[in-house]
Image (cartoon, grey):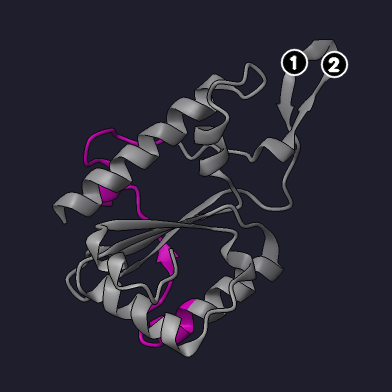
Amino acid sequence: MPLTDDRVFDYPWIYATQVGYWQLGDDETGRLREYLLRGGFLVVDDFYGPEQWSVFRESMKRVFPERAIVEISEQSAVLHVLYDLDQRTQIPGLRHLRRGPGGEIVVEPQETGPRWRGIYDDEGRLLVAVNFNMDIGDAWEHADMPEYPEPMTALAYRFGINYIIYAMTH
């Protein structure tokens, strides 16, 4: 759904992928800011590396010029609202999995490790959850594939459930 669609306000949380390619217009950045400040929650996922980070960071500077993107701390409520998420395992996209020696599925090394970052409001409520250098959505999408590692799928579901519960209660 486009950010400019008024129905966006009917949803307590929205999910955006490949935000390292965003080219949001002024109307979209204004609408995203309004959505988030009115209580919405955004989860971004499936973007990698310094170039895509730069595109996303610049987009968010247009949405919130006064707010920094920071690391989500181990104590953050979003990591403990239902599941205690103390694992910071990289959850790869399907394209990052390879069959290794002996047929074992291995994760192709990434240029940088996974990062859980966020943007908070003045009261400390997380507005935007940033899954950088990972693809939690692929873990959901490919959960039924024997090739996709079950521990990463289980962890991805826990993150998703925590995000939804956090959005509904904060």
Q: Residue furthest right?
A: 101
Asked whether residue 79 is in view, the answer is no
Residue 110 versus residue 94: which sits nearer the camera? Answer: 94
Q: Is residue 128 left or right of residue 91?
A: left
**Element marked by disc 2:** helix
Vertical comparison of 30 with 152: above or below: below
Residue drawn at (37%, 58%) of the image? 14
Q: Amino acid at mark 1?
A: Glu
Question: Which residue is tagged 2?
Answer: 101
Residue at x 60% of width, y 23% of height: 149
Q: Nearer the viewer, residue 110 or 4?
A: 4
Main secondary structure along the magenta-highlighted residues: loop
Question: Is 134 above or below relative to 105?
Answer: below
Position of the C terminus, as image quadrant, is bottom left
Q: Which label is found at residue 104?
A: 1
Question: x%, y% of residue 76?
Answer: 28, 52
The three-letter amino acid code for the residue at tag 2 is Pro
Residue 15: say if magenta: no
Q: Residue at x 57, y 65 (%)?
A: 19
- Magenta segment includes 71: yes
Measure how far apart labels 2 and 1 are at the Cα level: 6 Å
